[in-house]
């Protein structure tokens, strides 16, 4: 019964025994846990004084594989994150229809961290410690990931993070299926520089860590490429900024210096609609000053009338318009799942698609859902992505991705105008930041380190920890 | 019998009509041109486009426009080039570009888009503008000449010069001359600098800036001189622009706050659900646009009364179900309405969608009103500014000139006395709250043209609204107007200097300090009503 | 002595009794019950309860100014967050060279942002005593300056509420700015240890939980001491009739300032205890909506009772924990509905309900004089 729990390297022989069991027994588990059941549990929980919790016995083999979904369903981030919850639920349904994994069904455990960062940590702990989930798919913002990170590391969980982010992180327990800066920002800038001939740059972003870092990296990169300091304008705005008159007017002025100008936008979600509206109204056309965005996808565009924006750009690793049968099938399934003919897909959804399939493959490879075994097995796992290629999990827990540049069309979709000739492997530590230039991550033994310093030949953080332990 | 026969005849005629172009299609030169374009590698696209232009085919314009708008696709199986009429969803409606005949719907999987990028689109715009220069309407000609700025290349110089000679409209001539001069300055022509000297057009400035950096001493010197004189003119325009930005932001603040000025200022209800009432107005606009697809303008106008009614109805429900039980406990209305705001937000998320909704801006509201080349006022904001002033005037009229206004003022000043004079205070309460809520709905209709329509819309404005009302003085509509406009202007004046975040912080600190100086706001209420 | 007086009150004794009983029970159940027993309290639950207690202390602080002074502060989240940031800065410095970049002095986010040296206001936070003083001092000073200005010029009522909201909103925007040197939107996170104890061990969690319980007890006694003292009576008088109290010769603004500053410091302590337990502090704690929520807890529990604030805070947050788990799509309906129903049907909150029942039982046995609501 107790197979594949605590032991780090569980013998495969035993595993097959365990996994055979459910085949001989009738499947009583429902694929998705009903609310009733958990309601009952929580009522009990409520009755036994305040939050006296009931801990469950460890997972038995015929139990379903529990998949925690940690996406905000309310609050400011619900706009972006609810579709990701639906995506994972859909993937689980499909996997169960195929007979589950290792003969076990999968079950979604959904919680709502409500766009509240401390609550993310609490809910992650709830998922891992109380619900004993085998894997978590979740988070959108960097701060929520930072908040969850110590919990996942402490309780040795697995987290698949599906959003493009600033890099500078590699955790043993986290798999980054979104783009690192070298998989989005740098190729996009290269495209603008080489194909469009841009010489003057506006780096506009929302004031938080992802734009700050990305812009820092881009600034160093551009200056390395010989762009003068006065040809770079950096601007930050608060979250949800809605009055762009002054900034757009500044951009217009900055663009009239006689050099081809482009805006590299790391403006976050909600602030984009008023930004693009203002661009359109002040008459900045894509052929004059193109805007390349890293945070605007199909989902965001579905809230904008895109007619005035035709030709502005976005850099992603997936577009809904990608001409590929796997993608069309995914879209068909998604539309069927949501029951909405107009439903759109986007890049983080593809990241979850890849992450989910990688997890399934890794579990099959390891023959168990044991966290350490899966962690070992997943490195090198390769699954098809939706753009006609393959995504491989690298030793630094990032994946390989194609980089696509798309132009906005009047139907709220992007048309791909350029793509990297080959797949780009995610870089956890940027080469363009002085602090991380020499660092690499490799979670294979014997190195097994997220912060290996190639200059000193030591593993940064764990060296410190060892020193502390010695004292 | 005769009906039958004529029907048969009609059918035969139709079949003939349909089959004729089909045979003609094979020899249609357009077909080869389009396939040539579709198959051209990136480097040959320009050639293919030029071939279409020089063919003199009258359908060329339509093809190029479709190409520019990503509406040209190829059927994967047959290789036929088709026009995409509707490219939303999984099945696209297509038509034959040669005959214009509708070919029905085809799955997106079967179609391959003819690729275009910004560089080509830019050239295409120049070519299309060139075609438009022959249009009979001088307005169209002027607009297309305007589009030519910065897009002139060697191939266009000659036709433009020819156009300049035969053009009789002075405005269009100026534009063409300017467009040519921009090109020539770029080529190092010193005389052309003089043409640009007085122009405020950003493209002209861009050309001069580039010239000022050039190695040609003479050119650089005269370009620098020209730039100096332009800078002088620009300063004034920039000041006017900032003022407009400020008033525009202010008008948004006024709109958002004015409903609150009534429910909070006059009735004393701290309505935390005010933001959500704004949100309801915005969603009404979206709903109306769904009801009238293809007519965003009509839908927008209709949503003004509709938004008012929806929000007012919601207001009445809130008043009847909750607020009436909280008479004389203003602080508790804060808690109850906070609860309501949470419910309304989640309701929208559950019933409609957690995602933002698209609200289309009608044609007449997009773009900007061009004062001169350096100063143009964005139309949507101009309309919102006017709308805010109209709403304010309307409210003033209601409060000053109608019986309702009189009763509202009476009830606010002395409820018991008003009741003993025969005023039905409960009814007045309902009407006042409905009015305040309805105005919030109007704000929502206006905001749908500026910002996101989503569940978080209300939250973004609630704090600003309270600041404006308190800064202006609770219970004073004029105060709200002045406060909104001045806070907006201060913010925009500070922004270029301090940045968006710091500007906002400074404004907040300013409000805090101002309240120390005048604890009852800009226009404090006087007399007995002010106490308690 | 004003501090010992509350200890002789029956209500305080009851409150402290319940609190300590709960602390002991949780500790016992956590330590001595076997893991798989139904009665075992997991480390997760202990931390969760610790968080509730922090919120309870914060609610007590708000109740002190709102219930007994009549100042509806919509900005108490600011004091809470400042206390939290002071603690967070201490915890950041404790990481030392164990950060990902291994810089012995600079926290990770500064290395990341290319900062060359520690900003001046970060100095001293490597010492626990300094940080703990700052936990009290930072919110206290802010409250002193803000209160001095506001009370001196007699800003009252909604005006005061709205400018407290402006205060916390401005601070939120400021802390969001990365240039401020507080980690911007990501805030401070990835803490390792506190006073040498590893934050990731269950023992430290339990210790923090107990410390929070004790802090709540002390905070409660201080507040009780203030409201039963002469100063407390004057402050209640201010609440009910400010002008009249002033005419009687009391320096109203001094009373207000004193109570306001004490309340801010208590909120700061609550924030400082909150941070190591949840593991992150970031500017969203400054959000005006959070401050409004605190007021809602107090109202729900019952204003001007102190213990009501504790009940309200724990209940609402417990409800949030449960609802976000069992009905992630609809919990806001439940929470929002709760607020509406309580304000309409329970104007004195849960404490009012308790009082009513007690009154019904013992008729006019207990003297509850000053508990008048405005």
Image (tube, helix red, strand yellow):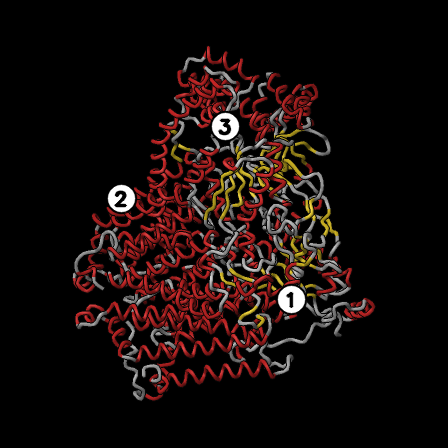
Q: Position of residue A48 (x, y in %)?
A: 54, 80
**Residue A71 in sight from this viewpoint:** no
Identify the residue under disc 1.
A467
Near-viewer residue (C251 or B386): C251
Near-viewer residue (B401 or A51): A51
Q: Residues within 10 Å of mark 1 (few under 14, many from 20)?
A: few
Residue at 63 percent across and 43 percent down: it is A319
Identify the residue under disc 3.
A258
Identify the residue under disc 2.
B393
**Residue C152 in sight from this viewpoint:** yes
Q: CA distance from mark 2 to mark 1?
A: 73 Å
Asked if C192 appears above or below A44 in the picture, the reply is above
Q: Position of residue B206 (x, y in %)?
A: 47, 27
Report the chain holding disc 3.
A
Q: Position of residue A264 (x, y in %)?
A: 54, 40
Label number found at residue C94: none
Q: Are marks 1 and 3 on the same chain?
A: yes
Quarter of the figure that contains the C terminus of chain B: bottom left
């Amino acid at each position: 019964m107790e197979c594949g729990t605590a032991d780090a390297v569980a013998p495969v022989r035993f595993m097959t025994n365990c996994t055979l069991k459910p085949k001989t027994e009738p499947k009583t588990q429902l694929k998705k846990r009903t609310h009733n059941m958990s309601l009952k549990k929580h009522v009990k929980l409520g009755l036994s004084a305040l939050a006296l919790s009931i801990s469950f016995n460890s997972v038995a083999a015929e139990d379903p594989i529990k998949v925690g979904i940690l996406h905000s369903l309310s609050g400011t981030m619900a706009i972006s994150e609810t579709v990701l919850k639906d995506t994972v639920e859909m993937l689980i349904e499909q996997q169960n229809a195929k007979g589950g994994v290792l003969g076990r069904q999968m079950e979604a455990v959904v919680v709502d961290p409500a766009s509240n960062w401390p609550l993310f940590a609490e809910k992650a702990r709830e998922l891992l410690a109380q619900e004993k989930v085998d894997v978590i798919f979740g988070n959108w913002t960097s701060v929520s990931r930072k908040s969850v990170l110590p919990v996942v590391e402490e309780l040795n969980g697995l987290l698949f993070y599906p959003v493009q982010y600033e890099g500078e992180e590699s955790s043993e327990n986290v798999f980054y299926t979104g783009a690192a800066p070298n998989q989005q920002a740098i190729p996009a800038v290269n495209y603008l520089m080489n194909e469009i001939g841009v010489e003057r740059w506006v780096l506009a972003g929302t004031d938080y860590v992802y734009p700050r870092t990305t812009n820092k990296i881009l600034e160093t990169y551009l200056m390395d490429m010989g762009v003068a300091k006065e040809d770079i304008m950096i601007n930050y705005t608060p979250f949800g900024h809605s009055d762009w008159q002054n900034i757009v007017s500044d951009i217009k002025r900055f663009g009239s210096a006689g050099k081809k100008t482009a805006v590299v936008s790391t403006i976050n979600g909600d602030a984009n609609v008023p930004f693009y509206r203002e661009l359109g109204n002040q008459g900045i056309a894509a052929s004059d000053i193109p805007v390349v965005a890293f945070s605007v996808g199909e989902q965001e565009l579905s809230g904008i009338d895109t007619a005035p924006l035709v030709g502005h750009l976005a850099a992603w690793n997936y577009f809904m318009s990608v001409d590929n049968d796997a993608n069309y099938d995914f879209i068909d399934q998604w539309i069927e799942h949501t029951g909405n003919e107009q439903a759109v897909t986007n890049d983080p959804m593809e990241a979850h698609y890849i992450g989910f399939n990688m997890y399934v493959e890794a579990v099959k490879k390891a023959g168990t859902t044991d966290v350490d075994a899966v962690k070992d097995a997943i490195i090198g796992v390769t699954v098809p992505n939706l753009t006609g290629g393959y995504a491989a999990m690298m030793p630094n827990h990032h994946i390989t991705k194609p980089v696509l540049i798309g132009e906005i069309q009047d139907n709220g979709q992007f048309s791909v105008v350029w793509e990297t000739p080959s797949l780009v492997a995610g870089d956890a530590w940027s080469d363009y930041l002085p602090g991380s230039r020499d660092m690499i991550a490799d979670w294979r033994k014997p190195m097994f380190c997220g912060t290996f310093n190639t200059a000193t030949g030591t593993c940064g953080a764990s060296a410190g920890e060892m020193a502390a332990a010695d004292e | 019998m005769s009906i039958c026969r004529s029907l048969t005849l009609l059918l035969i005629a139709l079949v003939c009509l349909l089959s004729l172009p089909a045979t003609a299609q094979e020899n249609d030169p357009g077909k080869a041109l389009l396939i040539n374009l579709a198959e051209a590698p990136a480097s040959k696209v320009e050639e293919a486009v030029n071939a279409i232009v020089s063919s003199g085919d009258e359908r060329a314009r339509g093809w190029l426009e479709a190409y520019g708008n990503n509406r040209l696709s190829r059927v994967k199986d047959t290789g036929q080039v088709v026009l995409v009429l509707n490219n939303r969803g999984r099945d696209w409606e297509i038509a034959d570009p040669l005959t214009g005949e509708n070919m029905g719907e085809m799955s997106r999987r079967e179609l391959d888009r003819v690729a275009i990028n910004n560089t080509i689109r830019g050239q295409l715009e120049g070519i299309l503008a060139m075609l438009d220069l022959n249009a009979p309407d001088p307005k169209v000609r002027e607009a297309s000449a305007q589009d030519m700025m910065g897009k002139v290349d060697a191939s266009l110089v000659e036709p433009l010069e020819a156009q300049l000679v035969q053009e009789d409209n002075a405005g269009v001539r100026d534009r063409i001359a300017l467009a040519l001069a921009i090109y020539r300055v770029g080529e190092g022509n010193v005389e052309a600098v003089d043409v640009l000297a007085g122009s405020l057009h950003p493209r002209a400035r861009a050309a001069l800036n580039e010239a000022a950096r050039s190695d040609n001493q003479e050119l650089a010197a005269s370009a620098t001189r020209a730039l100096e004189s332009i800078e002088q003119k620009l300063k004034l325009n920039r000041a006017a622009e900032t003022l407009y930005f400020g008033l525009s932001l202010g008008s948004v603040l006024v709109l958002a706050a004015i409903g609150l000025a009534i429910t909070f200022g006059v009735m004393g209800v701290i309505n935390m659900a005010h933001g959500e009432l704004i949100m309801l107005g915005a969603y009404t606009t979206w709903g109306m646009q769904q009801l009238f697809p293809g007519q965003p303008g009509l839908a927008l106008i209709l949503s003004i009364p509709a938004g008012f009614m929806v929000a007012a109805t919601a207001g009445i429900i809130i008043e009847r179900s909750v607020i009436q039980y909280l008479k004389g406990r203003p602080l508790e209305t804060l808690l109850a309405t906070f609860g309501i705001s949470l419910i309304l937000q989640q309701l929208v998320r559950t019933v409609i969608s957690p995602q933002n909704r698209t609200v289309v801006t009608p044609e007449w509201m997009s773009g900007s009103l061009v004062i001169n080349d350096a100063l143009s006022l964005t139309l949507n904001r101009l309309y919102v500014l006017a709308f805010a002033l109209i709403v304010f005037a309307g409210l003033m009229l209601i409060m000053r000139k109608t019986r309702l206004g009189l009763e509202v003022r009476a009830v606010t000043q002395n409820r018991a006395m008003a009741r003993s004079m025969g005023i039905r205070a409960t009814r007045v309460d309902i009407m006042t709250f409905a009015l305040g809520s309805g105005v919030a709905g109007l704000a929502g209709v206006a905001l749908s043209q500026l910002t996101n329509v989503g569940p978080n819309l209300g939250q973004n404005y609630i704090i600003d609204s309270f600041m404006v009302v308190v800064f202006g003085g609770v219970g004073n509509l004029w105060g709200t107007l002045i406060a909104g406009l001045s806070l907006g202007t201060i913010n925009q004046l500070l922004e270029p200097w301090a940045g968006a975040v710091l500007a906002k912080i400074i404004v907040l600190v300013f409000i805090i300090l101002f309240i120390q100086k005048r604890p009852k706001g800009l226009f404090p209420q006087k007399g007995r009503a002010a106490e308690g | 002595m004003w501090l010992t007086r509350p200890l002789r009150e029956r209500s305080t004794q009851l409150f402290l009794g319940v609190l300590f009983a709960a602390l002991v029970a949780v500790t016992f159940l956590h330590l001595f019950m076997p893991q798989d027993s139904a009665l075992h309290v997991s480390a997760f639950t202990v931390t969760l309860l610790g968080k509730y207690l922090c919120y309870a202390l914060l609610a007590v602080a708000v109740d002190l100014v709102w219930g007994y002074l009549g100042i509806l502060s919509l900005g108490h989240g600011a004091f809470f967050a400042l206390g939290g940031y002071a603690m967070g800065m201490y915890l950041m410095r404790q990481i030392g060279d164990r950060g990902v970049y291994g810089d012995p002095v600079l926290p990770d986010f500064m290395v990341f942002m290319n900062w060359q040296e520690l900003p001046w206001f970060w100095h001293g936070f490597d010492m626990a005593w300094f940080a703990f003083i700052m936990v009290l001092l930072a919110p206290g000073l802010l409250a002193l300056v803000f209160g001095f200005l506001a009370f001196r010029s007699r800003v009252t009522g909604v005006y005061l509420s709205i400018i407290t909201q402006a205060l916390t909103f401005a601070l939120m925007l400021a802390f969001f700015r990365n240039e401020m040197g507080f980690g911007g939107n990501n805030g401070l996170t990835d803490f390792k240890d506190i006073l040498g104890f590893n934050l990731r061990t269950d023992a430290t969690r339990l210790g923090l939980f107990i410390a929070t319980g004790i802090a709540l007890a002390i905070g409660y006694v201080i507040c009780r001491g203030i409201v039963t003292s002469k100063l407390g009576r004057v402050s209640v008088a201010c609440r009910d009739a400010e002008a009249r109290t002033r005419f009687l010769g009391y320096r109203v603004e001094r009373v207000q300032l004193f109570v306001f500053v004490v309340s801010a410091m208590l909120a700061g302590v609550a924030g400082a205890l909150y941070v190591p337990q949840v593991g992150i502090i970031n500017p969203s704690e400054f959000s005006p909506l959070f401050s409004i929520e605190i007021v809602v807890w107090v109202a729900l529990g019952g204003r001007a009772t102190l213990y009501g604030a504790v009940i309200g805070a724990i209940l609402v947050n417990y409800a949030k924990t449960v609802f976000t788990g069992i009905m992630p799509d609809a919990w806001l309906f439940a929470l929002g509905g709760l607020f509406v129903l309580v304000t309409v049907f329970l104007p004195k909150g849960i404490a009012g309900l308790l009082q009513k029942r007690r009154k019904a039982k013992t008729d006019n046995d207990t003297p509850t004089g000053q508990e008048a609501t405005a």
